[in-house]
Amino acid sequence: MTVRQRYPSRLPADLHRISQAPLLDEWLLEPDDRAADGAVLTGVISGHPRYPDGSRVTTSTVQQIEDTPAGSFGGWAWCYSTGLLRLGRCIDIHYSRGVSL
């Protein structure tokens, strides 16, 4: 597992609370079509205070992401305004790893 960062910085201060973070499952890292650069996550959210469980969401700009080997679960992402997310299963890990933050 490797951490990719949009800008050189420290790890998120709330990473110690990863077990309590909302879960984003069936996710994909995609270029942000709302901005000139950057990337967002799309997926199915659960445990988030603003969205009902099972909602398909698009996050704010991904600042840091740690994904896992293809086909496995785990990892985390920290997004600009969405905050810390646990990552479930990625629907296309090879595509997601090719997307620049």
Image: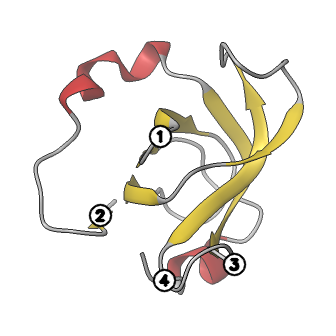
CB-based contact (under 8 Å), mark 2 and mark 3: no
Disc with the residue nearer the chain's start (1 vs 3): 3
- Name the amino acid, label 1: Ser
> Along the line of sight, which residue is nearer the eye, 3 or 50?
50
> Residue, x 75% and y 32% (percent of image)?
45
Mark 1: few/some/many CA within 10 Å (<14, 14-19, 20+):
few
- Mark 1 lies on residue: 81
> Residue, x 47% and y 56% (percent of image)?
68
Instruction: Report the side of 101 relative to 40 (left or right).
Output: left
Determine whether the residue tagged by mark 2 lies in a helix, strand or loop. loop
What numbered label is drawn on residue 72?
Answer: none
CB-based contact (under 8 Å), mark 1 and mark 2: no
Determine whether the residue tagged by mark 1 lies in a helix, strand or loop. loop
- Mark 4 lies on residue: 37
The location of residue 41, given as percent across then percent down, is 63, 57
Label 1 to label 3, Cα distance in Å? Answer: 17 Å
Q: Quadrant of residue 18?
A: top left
Disc with the residue nearer the chain's start (2 vs 4): 2
- Name the amino acid, label 2: Thr
The location of residue 3, given as percent across then percent down, is 28, 60
Determine whether the residue tagged by mark 4 lies in a helix, strand or loop. loop
- Mark 2 lies on residue: 2
